[in-house]
Image (cartoon, helix red, strand yellow):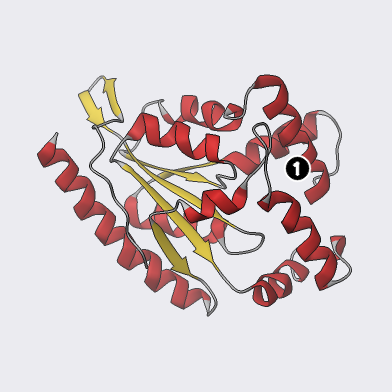
Amino acid sequence: MRQRLGARASGGLLSSERGCVWLNCVGVTGFFAAGKTTAAKIFSKELGARVFSLADEVRLEAGKRGLEPTVGNLSRLANEFRKRRGAGFWAKRVLEKMKRPGSEWVVAESIRSPAEARIFRNFFGKRFFFVCVSAPEETRFKRFRRTPRGREFRSFKEFKSAEGKQLRGGRRSQGLEKVVEGAAFVLENSGSLRDLEKGVKALALELRRAAGSAGERS
């Protein structure tokens, strides 16, 4: 697990009926079938956090258009909105929902472009904790094959090719490789669900301490 927490200006301060509330955000990124959604759910349980999925926002738009939620369709639709509405469109959409009253922890799941990560960093400052969920390619391919979309890629080669398109990114598309490299923490998820739960629980405790330290320095 690597840590690269910087001493950025404090962010994530919201006004509510209870007064001013600090909002802490766990950002989750990773490659296909790494376990992002599962990790986000565990963070939610451990931190009492609300989960906001950028991928779910894309799926919602796909449903409105009657599109089947395949990897290809979702990627094309997400990039279409990035080109028309700006590279950080999906992050801004989720951020507005995060600002509504609720718990003091939120999870932004499925951050997939540098612009999206930058929007969360700029708003939350040192209260943004960026986590990459990682697993070997072969393991992720086997997991993907067990999902409802498992027949989408007929071979490991097709799986790698589709992922490769997401790794590269221009100003208005994804650049997942750069996003993953910018994560402050890495959660290895090559083992069992129980192993992942242990890893997330340990990291959640560390993030609580870091959030407390950020409050002391604010």
Name the residue: 45% across, 77% down.
195
Mark 1, secondary structure of its residue: helix
- Residue sitting at x 56%, y 26%: 93
Dot 1 amino acid type: Ser
Name of the residue lying farthest toward the bottom = 191
Instruction: For the C terminus, give its image quadrant.
Output: top left
**Would you say residue 182 is visible in this rendering?**
yes
Q: Nearer the viewer, residue 119 or 151?
A: 119
| Pointer 1 residue | 75
Q: Position of residue 149 (x, y in %)?
A: 80, 59
Q: Which quadrant of the structure image shows residue 33?
A: bottom right
- Position of residue 211 measured from the top left corner of the image (x, y, whole percent): 22, 46
> How crowded is the residue under tag 1: few (<14 C-alpha within 10 Å), some, or many (20+)?
some
Q: How many marks?
A: 1
Q: Residue at x 79, y 35 (%)?
A: 63
Q: Is residue 43 above or below residue 107?
A: below
On the rendered image, what quadrant is the N terminus found in? bottom left
Instruction: Decide if residue 47 is on the left or right side of residue 18.
Output: right
The answer to whether residue 135 is left or right of residue 204 is right
Q: Would you place residue 136 above or below residue 84 in this image?
A: below
Q: Using the image as rendered, state which of residue 92 and residue 119 is in the foreground.
A: 119
34 up-or-down from 98: above or below: below
**Residue located farthest toward the left when viewing the structure as drawn:** 216
Is residue 39 placed above or below 26 in the rendered structure?
below
Answer left or right for 81 relative to 193. right
Q: Residue shown at 15%/39% (left/top)?
A: 215
State whether residue 148 appears in this view: no
Q: Nearer the viewer, residue 67 or 172?
A: 172
User: Looking at the picture, how far across and down is residue 209, in whole percent?
Assistant: 19, 54
For this view, does 165 lie left or right of residue 200? Answer: right
